Image (tube, grey):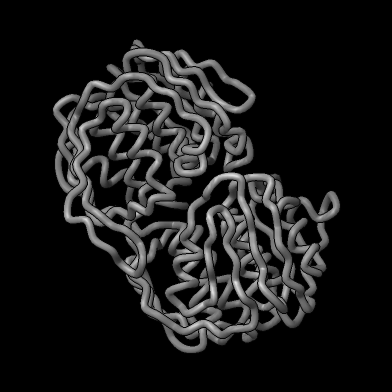
Amino acid sequence: MSVAPGGALRGTVRIPGDKSLSHRAVMLASLASGSSRITHFLPGEDCLGTIRCFRAMGVPIEGAGSEWIVHGQGLHGLKEPGEILDVGNSGTTVRLMLGLLAGIDGFATVTGDASIRKRPMGRIVAPLRQMGASIDGREDGTLAPLAVRGRKLSAIHYQSPVASAQIKSAVLLAGLRAEGTTSVTEPLLSRDHTELMLAAMGARIRRDGLTVSVEGGHELSPCDVEVPGDISSAAFWLVAASIAPGSDLLLENVGINPTRTGVLDVLERMGADITRLNAREIAGEQVADLRVRAAKLTGTSIQGEVIPRLVDEIPILALAAACATGTTLVRDAQELRVKESDRLSAIATELGKLGAKIQELPDGLIIEGGTRWHGERCESRGDHRIAMMLGLAALVTPQPVEIEGVRCTETSYPGFWETLTGLRA
């Protein structure tokens, strides 16, 4: 794809449904005793893959696009699938689903695309095995495909070595069917969507500082879920409007859960002109409209406790940093090495092709601002966030940016390229 250079962005964007919440809404509604309606669901490839997997486990799910009804089968209602569960490119689906499959009455095999088969699963498998799960696969169950034979599970108190919502959620979901109270303690607070949704569905769940616990054996109640807009998707427009002179965008219905708003904190620290409007709460999740206008940005430091709150936004923040005045330091972000691509390498290499001066560190980046941009041919590496980052880089290049492999944006943001075109009109 060739993305034309330059141009201000103006208009209103209805941000697509949050990917993390869309996955969780399907999973938890499937475990409830009764029917739940999900609106503003993200109809991207990852989330539709989650629907396919739960249908394969006997859950009736009807609907299309952004509206679905899930007829939950109860805490013990998932059936042994008659086919291999293929999660496609979704790390969230495979990792959270392992927590549910660990206690299923039967056997299941889970796999995904080439990217998923390279991504580490050992840190999910380890605590589940402590609970009594039988999980096997390549390299002692640390790589997919994974075979799971459901067993009776016991509660554990797990000290997670990293702040990871996927580890925490997998253990808590397994804990729903374990005997006793299961708890997870993290070194830093990760996103808490699973806990909030479980609480809304009547689970006996409690947070005490960095520890969250759930009492097993209690059925979930169905509830209707309105999924807020994904702040990870909104982040692309927050940066785009900030770096493209003359831009003025209104982003509607954006989830601003405090465990996800690191990108707002960092951009505001860099000097971005962002206003929160119409703040409200929907099903326990904080939501607002965001107005963003072009601004002069300055470099900053991104490390420590903020990383779990913005890890998915680092690619687009790197573009902001390359457009800023001064140097930006990113540390403690080694998690990006094992995403859909090695994102640290992809950021440094692909933005470097366009003129950015970025030094790659083992756990981060040093980004020199004031880039002298130019157009070039780049590669998305099959990673949706890298593809969108490169597309928006064209806003500041004097020549077009050619991007190989843009279909991957369907993973999280169907219609992204059409939205970009419309905002430039």
- Look at the picture and state if 88 lies above or below 272: below
Q: Quadrant of the N terminus?
A: top left
Q: Position of residue 154 (x, y in %)?
A: 76, 73
- Look at the picture and state if 105 lies above or below 267: below
User: Looking at the image, which residue is at 39% across and 26% down?
Assistant: 319
User: Looking at the image, which residue is at 82% across and 53% down?
Assistant: 138
- Look at the picture and state if 356 lies above or below 123: above
Q: Relative to the observer, which residue lies in front, 61 or 134?
A: 134
Determine if residue 82 is in view: no
User: Looking at the image, which residue is at 38% across and 38% down?
Assistant: 263
Q: Quadrant of the C terminus?
A: top left
User: Looking at the image, which residue is at 22% across and 56% down?
Assistant: 279
Determine if residue 417 is in view: yes
Q: Relative to the observer, which residue lies in front, 399 or 58?
A: 58
Q: Is residue 54 left or right of residue 193?
A: right
Q: Position of residue 377 (x, y in %)?
A: 44, 23
Q: Position of residue 19 (x, y in %)?
A: 44, 57
Give the number of marks. Answer: 0
The residue lying furthest to the right in this view is 140
Q: Quadrant of residue 22?
A: bottom left
- Look at the picture and state if 233 lies above or below 170: above
Q: Quadrant of residue 65?
A: bottom left
Q: Position of residue 199 (x, y in %)?
A: 47, 72
